[in-house]
Image (cartoon, rainbow, N blue to C red):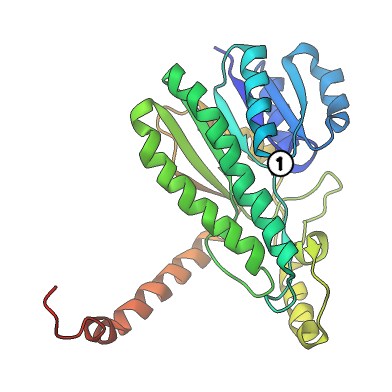
Amino acid sequence: MSKVWFVTGSSRGLGRCFAEAALSRGDKVAATARNAASLDALVAGYGDAVLPLDLDVTDRAAAFESVKRAKEHFGRLDVIVNNAGYAQIGALEELTEAELRDQFETNLFGAVWVIQAALPCLREQGAGHIIQMSSVAGLIAMPLGGAYQASKWALEAVNETLAGEVAGFGIKVTVVEPAGFATRSGNNPDPLNNGHMAEADPNYDGLRQRLAGVMGDKPAGDPAAAAQVLLKIVDSDDPPLRVLFGKGFHQMLEQVYADRLKTWADGQDLSTESYGNLAV
């Protein structure tokens, strides 16, 4: 049986590739973008299998209305892909209040609004799969990415919590953690150059230059290949809660988590001392 998808951020990048992969195998897609005109080519290629929708995910009422329209149009929803988001780049000292709040409004709150809108439908069906696009940046932290990384770390917690809350309703949750993926032009998107940039403080120029050199050396993944893997995940009877998309980061994560465990182990005496002499 074909599936019905609801995909946010379908105008370009991974979201567009996910929509195209689903459509190319006969599934139906409610594709959303801030400007639905960016979806015209998708509609021209796949006709009635696509429902283009204007959606700014930061608008909670609009998220609920878009999900409602998709459900009414197709009769059901099987796969919810929370893909909309962007990277706000800047040292913590450089970030304005508006930049930090806007980052969370889109990346975190926007995803939550879509989830809240979709859950009654999925619960009524007794089935469904929520795909949350996170990032390797949701697992590790690097300088100049504090706003973006904090929003992705929050999404990791939200969706792990969600998985435990909705499993009894037959709803599955998978958090996808991509590394860098190439654009249509074949470039590896470097967030230091392609993200939303805070006004630069010269005190951090040296750090910016060093990180730019490191990021430029990372391999780029193929979005079309990622989309085919996502199809396997949504077709699985037992999909993973988390999955890395991209090469070269598993070993890095092993070291990061080993270092964290060692830090906590080295601080055992301090942990015990922090309780004092009170009985616990």
| Disc 1 crowd, CA 10 A, few/some/many (<14, 14-19, 20+) | many
Quadrant where the N terminus sits is top right
Q: Nearer the viewer, residue 191 or 93?
A: 93
Q: Nearer the viewer, residue 262 or 160?
A: 160
Q: Relative to 167, is 187 above or below? A: below
Q: Is residue 26 left or right of residue 239?
A: right
Give residue 203's position: percent from left, percent from top: 78, 88
Give residue 79's position: percent from left, percent from top: 56, 27
- Residue at 87% x, 25% y is 40
Disc 1 secondary structure class: helix
- Residue at 70% x, 21% y is 23
Q: Is residue 162 visible?
A: yes
Amino acid type, residue under disc 1 in the picture: Leu
Q: Is residue 248 visible?
A: no
Give residue 3's position: percent from left, percent from top: 58, 18
Q: Relative to 191, is 21 above or below? A: above
Q: Residue furthest front?
A: 61
Q: Relative to 203, is 137 above or below? A: above
- Residue at 71% x, 67% y is 97
Q: Which residue is mark 1?
A: 14
- Residue at 58% x, 56% y is 152
Q: Quadrant of residue 198?
A: bottom right
Quadrant where the C terminus sits is bottom left
Q: Nearer the viewer, residue 21 or 141?
A: 141
Count the numbered circles shown. Answer: 1
Give residue 60's position: percent from left, percent from top: 65, 38
